[in-house]
Amino acid sequence: MSSSSSSSSSSSSQSKFLDSGFVMGQKEVTRILILFLGLTASCLVLYKAAYPLQRLDLNNLTSRLASPSPPLPNLNSSDISPETPKPKISFKEILENASMKNKTVIITTLNQAWAEPNSLFDLFLESFRIGQGTQQLLKHVVVVCLDPKAFQRCSQLHTNCYHIETSETDFSGEKVYNTPDYLKMMWRRIELLTQVLEMGFNFIFTDADIMWLRDPFPRLYPDGDFQMACDRFFGNPYDSDNWVNGGFTYVRSNNRSIEFYKLWHKSRLNYPDLHDQDVFNRIKHEPFITEIGIQMRFFDTVYFGGFCQTSRDINLVCTMHANCCIGLDKKLHDLNLVLDDWRNYLSLSEPVQNTTWSVPMKCLED
């Protein structure tokens, strides 16, 4: 055999060997691919069983990507959950919210004992609701609360409530007339009312044991910086010898009234065992009262009555005060009778000629 033919034979054998190797390589790759795809499919089946997939909405996904992110909650908005504490409103802001157009407010004070359910505060609010022309006055009433419990109850029943800090004394319980805590509470009230005048507000101060049966504003004197109710009225509204009662006062804010209240509060130091009403009686004839120039007027008990001297005419009475009465239970009993008398009066078709009150009853007992 020639060298060329042997070379040709050798090349042919190599070519066949290579072709067979290539075919075997293709089969091996195919086998590996099939095995890989089988394993992949098994993994997908197992994953889908463990974590079910939801169909992906491409249109929804596109719209979500295109839309802006939702805004963060506005901490100043009214949509805050009830759990978020509201910022405390200042006393001046509460006065402004409650003020009439002429910057007049109605102020009362309240502690826990008087704020309890079915206690004096409930009767006080009820009198406004059933009084003649008094319903619209409730929005002008500011309740100054002397302890947290009173503030909590007030906030459940009324809009304009303010908690005044009284860290030195616990004013929550019933304060018996003329006890040391009672005196502190009365002088804290005078201090507070001085601040109201300094902020430029006129006020009617009313104790919470006063029932508002008619709108009293038409019965206020057109003149007079300082106007006060009486335990006993002797006929002359200019006479400072009337037996006064500080539970109901109307005061106009001006330099004279501010100076008077400052001197009144300061005078407590000269009479440490007396409450504000008794101190007033001691200083009302002092020369500095004339020097200040304050004009004082005193209310007739026909319009502003009480248990000391009940109004003589239910057709004219504006307020009834549980004065000359010591003890919360006695006050509650007799003020409920006042509201009963008032409801009976409202049910009549004709004016009453002779007024007969059911009170005082318990308050006359020793």
Image: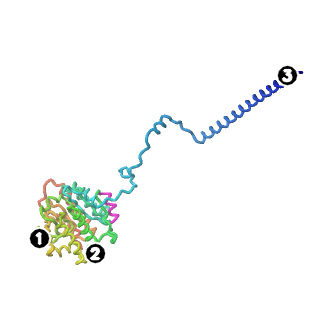
Q: Secondary structure at mark 3?
A: helix
Q: Quadrant of the N terminus?
A: top right
Residue 2 x/y as whole percent: 88, 21
User: Does the magenta-highlighted stretch encompass residue 264?
Assistant: no
Q: Nearer the viewer, residue 142 or 15?
A: 15
Bounds of the magenta segment: 147-158
Which callout, 2 or 1, points at the residue further toward the start of the chain?
Answer: 2
Which callout, 1 or 3, points at the residue further toward the start of the chain?
Answer: 3
Q: Quadrant of the C terminus?
A: bottom left
Q: Is 187 rendered above or below residue 94?
A: below
* Amino acid identity at mark 3: Ser
Please say if the residues under marks 1 and 3 sit with CB atoms less than 8 Å apart: no
Which callout, 2 or 3, points at the residue further toward the start of the chain?
Answer: 3
Q: Secondary structure at mark 1?
A: loop
The residue that label 3 is drawn on is: 4
The part of the image, by quadrant, that contains residue 174 is: bottom left
The part of the image, by quadrant, that contains residue 107 is: bottom left
The residue that label 1 is drawn on is: 239
* Amino acid identity at mark 2: Thr
Label at residue 82:
none
Residue at the front extreme?
3
Q: CA distance from mark 2 to mark 3?
A: 140 Å
Who's the residue at 26% across and 74% down the image? 178
